[in-house]
Image (tube, rainbow, N blue to C red):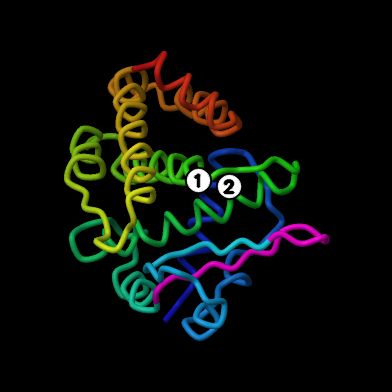
Amino acid sequence: MSTAVLGRLQGGLEQLYRVATGLAVESFLIDDASRTALGVARAPREQLLVMESDDGVDLGLYVDADVLANLATYDPGRGLDDRNLAAFLYALEGVSHFVYTAVCAQTARSVSALELELQAEVDKYVTCVLASDGAASATWRRRLYEQCAYEPDLDAGERDRYQVANDNARRYAASLERRFVTRRAIVDMFAELRRFYRLPLGGKLDAIARAA
């Protein structure tokens, strides 16, 4: 089992958004026993655990061992397909949550679960599109936002949060495709993504509403 892919994902996201957490995600990984000891209510295949204290914020990232083993066998750096896509998306979501939470903590900005999910859904689309050189944007939008399934053990509030994040990310991805990807204006898209990344949740939702 290798965690190198997590570090590469972190590096890619930090480079894309021009942020620097100063942290190594691999150092914050926790295993099954550690997560169980924390008494979490749900145990999904990826999970960022956050605990606030007087000294700041403590983070722990759980990524299922089978996910990491899959990515070690089918390196996403050599391409994404049915063998590794699900594992890749689990890993990317966890790293996205980790980086975004760390960035917000550095500026003492609070962040909601919905904001984390929305940013992660955007990160999935952008990363997959860049990995395919923009050639399959519409295909990725359908696969990520229309052909997705939710975990059966989500409660009503959690399901609603995931659906809101999915719907808004779908609309934002469509606007990115229309404004930038089809025009091959990738540099301009990077500027838009960096601006969007720094907005609070309300600003993100407003930007999506205006762009849709």
Quarter of the figure with residue 151: bottom left
Check disc 1 and report its element: helix, strand or loop.
Answer: helix
Tell whether label 2 touches label 1 (CB within 8 Å): yes
Q: Is residue 116 magenta?
A: no
Q: Nearer the viewer, mark 1 or mark 2?
A: 1
Residue at the image position 69 percent from the left and 64 percent from the top: 58
Residue 25 image position (x, y, % from top left): 59, 64
Residue 139 higher or lower than 44, as above or below: above
Check disc 2 and report its element: helix, strand or loop.
Answer: helix
| Residue at the disc numbered 1 | 116
Q: Earlier in the sequence, mark 1 or mark 2?
A: 2
* Tag of residue 100: 2
- Name the kind of residue labelled 2 in the image: Tyr
- Please indicate whether residue 130 sits to the left or right of residue 189 in the image: left
Quarter of the figure with residue 161: top left
Q: Foreground residue, 7 or 118?
A: 118
Residue at the image position 36 percent from the left and 34 percent from the top: 169
- For the residues labelled 1 and 2, the Cα–Cα distance comes to 7 Å
- Name the kind of residue labelled 1 in the image: Leu
Q: Quadrant of the N terminus?
A: bottom left
Q: Residue furthest right?
A: 55
Per the rendered image, the range of residues in magenta is 52-64
Q: Residues within 10 Å of mark 1 (few under 14, many from 20)?
A: many
